Structure formats: C-alpha cells, structure tokens
C-alpha cells in the first residue's frame, strides 16, 4: 500500500517483519506470552497497522503510552477482548475516557490507585489496571515500601482491578550490569504479595537476559521494530524500516569549495554531489552531518557507499557520489535499511535506535510490505 500523493522520500515498513520479530521473542520465552509495545505510533512504524498484524498473529495484549494512543489502537483493532494498557498511568480527569475505550491504566502511585478504585466503585465494579512497582529505575512506580503497604490492603487491591504487576529494567541492554540482578530480586520480593496477578518485568533486552526475567508476560518494544538488544551489538532481529531519499539534483563542484550551512565541509577534489530531498524536518537528525574534521553518516547508491557531505539542513542533505558512475536525478539513496543499519545510523547521529525510529516524520511516502 502506498500514499496517494507522490513524495520525494520513501519509508518502507515491513509489517511482516514486526510479526516475525515477535515470533523470535516467543521462541526465546518458550511459552511465556509476549505483549506488543506499540507506543509512539509503534516506534514510528504505524500503530494501527502494527496492532492489527500482531493481533492477527495471536497477540492479545498491547501497551501504549497515552490515552489518545490507546483510543486509536482500540479503534484500529475493533476487538473488545484485546487488552490495552496505558503506561503513563492515570492523569486526573481521564477515567471516563479509559473506561469508555476499555483501556487499563498502569498505576504507579497511591493517588492514582485510590482515584481509579474510587472511579470503579462509583461505576459499580472494579475496572482493570496494572500496578507498576519501581525496583531501581526511580521513574514511574510505587516504591517497595508503598507496594508492600498496597498489597496489605486487600480491599484496595480488589477495588483497583489490578490484573498485572510490573516493573521496568533500567540496564537490561548491559547484561552484566549489577542493577539487573538487584531489580530481579526486588521484583521477586513483591510478586508473592500480589497472588493471582500476572507478573511482567522483561522489556526487549530483558527477554534475552535469562528465563528468570520472563515471569508471566514479556513486553518487547524496540525489538519488534528491528532495534538493538544489547548495547554495542548488532541486532538479531529482522529490519523493519528502509528509508530512501530521491536525488533532486547532481552537481559538479570544483576542489576547494565549501558545501552547506556554515561552510563546514570543503571539497578536496573535483566532487560530484547529489542533493537529496530529506532533512531534519523529516527526523533525519542534523547530528549525522559531516565537516572537514570528520564524522557524518552515509547512504548507499547502487551498492556503493556515499558519505553525507556537510551539514544536514531542514529539507535537504548532500551526499558525495563521485565514486558512483551511474548516479542520476531521480535515483533513490538508501539512508536506513538492509545495508545502512538502524544501529549504524543511530551511531552516526550520536543517539539510539529508539530515537531514530520515533523521529521518522510524516512527510514520507509510506509503503507497507
């Protein structure tokens, strides 16, 4: 499927690869269910399409960040049985919207729990939720002391509608980090206090730590979209996105000329440059620019590496195609894909796979496999 309006930059999304990546996770967990984390528009790949594909393959639990994301996913699925959890919890005044669209908040503070329980009482029955316990990230979640106090209040546990108890690993992409084991033990200390609730600790990287981290439900996110599992290592997952930009113009530039904003890159030979219709307004970050001091990302044209030349601007970037004999206006240059991996692009930008994926803009022609 393609957009009706032709666009100069194309983002190919392999939805089948998302499904295959979840199956890869399931092979690792050996029977423990894997939810689909589809927040941030399924990491930039399209939440509605990802949700439908995953649901068709048997996924019945999804995690989003905001209520609005949950509403959109519920509409896309049209399935009353699928569970959709809202990770960012219960904002004041959102109770009715959550209930209407059958969304379950991930509750991470006592005020949230009290408010959700009160809303359920007012409507005659508890409504489903998850309880987030902080085990060492010091972000969202009940402290261990709060979690124990909550677990001791059977009436409040019942009124909260809790069906899942969960936590989040801070350093799972570093397998030897001591905090992984600390968080595991802390989570183990809370789990028996809330019997009958599904327990969930492992994110994408946590799945690959060891089976101890799997519990009753794993929550892969970036792994579904081809992201790296361990810091500094190639991803074992199938690539999902390919970004291709069209050459608008080929220009021959003599030696000694500067290129782009700030005149930071200078030709050192007669150079053939290709101007591509993509820039930081499309989420291709300026940090992948190059200068005379070095650095910069690259593309691939006709199987040949073409380095980014000079600063990336809002709508355009330039690559050096001097070594590509057949470069022509209208050709497409791979900027992310099977040759220029997501991990390589993230490294060139000085960031992580997550940020690259979630920054991909809306000006692309989106093509789905």
Image (cartoon, grey):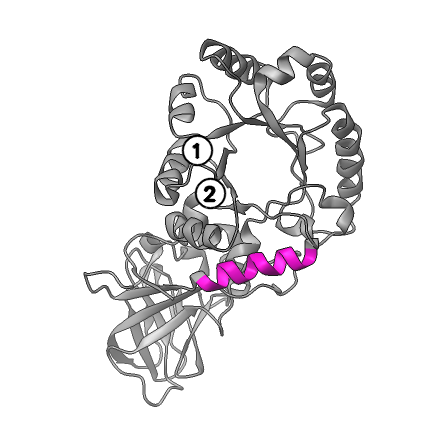
- Residue 44 appears at what percent x and percent y? 41, 51
Q: Which residue is mark 1?
A: 66
- Residue 155, above or below 231: above
Please identify the quadrant where the N terminus is shown.
Answer: bottom left
Magenta stretch prevailing secondary structure: helix
Q: Which mark is residue 39?
A: 2
Residue visible at 70% across and 20% down in the picture: 147
Viewer-closest of 158 and 170: 158
* Residue interval drawn in magenta: 16-28
Element class at badge 1: loop
Say which label, 2 or 1, has the lower sequence index: 2
Rounded to the nearest angstrom, the CA distance separating label 2 from label 1 is 8 Å
Q: Which residue is at the far left?
A: 5
User: Is disc 2 in contact with disc 1, using a CB cutoff of under 8 Å?
Assistant: yes
Q: Is residue 86 left or right of residue 155?
A: left
What is the quadrant of residue 288 in the picture? bottom left
What is the quadrant of residue 146 in the picture? top right
Q: Is residue 37 left or right of residue 257?
A: right
**Magenta stretch containing residue 203, yes or no?**
no
Residue visible at 49% across and 63% down in the picture: 17
Viewer-closest of 252 and 82: 82
Element class at badge 2: helix
Residue 334 seen in render: yes
- Residue 321 appears at what percent x and percent y? 36, 81
């Amino acid at each position: 499927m393609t957009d009706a309006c032709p666009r100069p930059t194309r983002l190919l999304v392999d939805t089948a690869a998302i499904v295959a990546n979840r199956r890869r996770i399931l092979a690792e967990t050996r029977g423990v269910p894997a939810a689909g984390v589809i927040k941030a528009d399924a990491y930039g790949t399209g939440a509605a399409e990802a949700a439908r594909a995953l649901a068709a393959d048997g996924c019945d639990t999804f995690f989003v960040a905001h209520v609005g994301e949950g509403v959109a996913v519920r509409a896309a699925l049209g399935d009353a049985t699928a569970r959709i959890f809202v990770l960012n919890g219960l904002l004041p005044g959102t109770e009715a919207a959550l209930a209407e669209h059958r969304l379950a908040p991930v509750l991470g503070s006592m005020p949230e729990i009290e408010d959700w329980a009160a809303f359920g009482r007012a409507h005659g029955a508890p409504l489903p939720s998850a309880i987030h316990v902080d085990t060492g990230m010091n972000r969202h979640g009940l402290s261990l002391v709060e979690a124990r106090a909550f677990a001791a209040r059977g009436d409040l546990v019942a009124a909260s509608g809790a069906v899942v108890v969960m936590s989040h690993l801070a350093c799972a992409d570093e397998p030897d980090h001591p905090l992984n084991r600390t968080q595991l033990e802390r989570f183990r200390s809370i789990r028996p206090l809330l019997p009958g609730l599904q327990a969930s600790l492992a994110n994408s990287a946590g799945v690959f730590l060891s089976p101890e981290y799997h519990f009753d439900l794993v929550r892969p996110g970036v792994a579904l979209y081809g992201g790296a599992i361990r810091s500094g290592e190639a991803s074992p997952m199938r690539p999902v996105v390919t970004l291709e930009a069209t050459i608008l113009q080929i220009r021959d530039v003599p030696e000694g000329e500067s290129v782009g904003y700030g005149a930071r890159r200078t030709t050192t030979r007669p150079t053939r440059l290709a101007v591509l219709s993509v820039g930081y307004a499309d989420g291709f970050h300026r940090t992948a620019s190059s200068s005379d001091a070095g650095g910069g990302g690259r593309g691939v044209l006709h199987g040949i590496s073409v380095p980014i030349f000079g600063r990336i601007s809002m709508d355009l970037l330039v690559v050096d195609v001097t070594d590509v004999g057949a470069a022509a206006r209208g050709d497409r240059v791979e900027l992310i894909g099977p040759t220029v991996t997501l991990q390589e692009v993230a490294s060139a930008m000085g960031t992580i796979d997550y940020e690259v994926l979630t920054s991909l803009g809306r000006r692309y022609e989106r093509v789905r496999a």
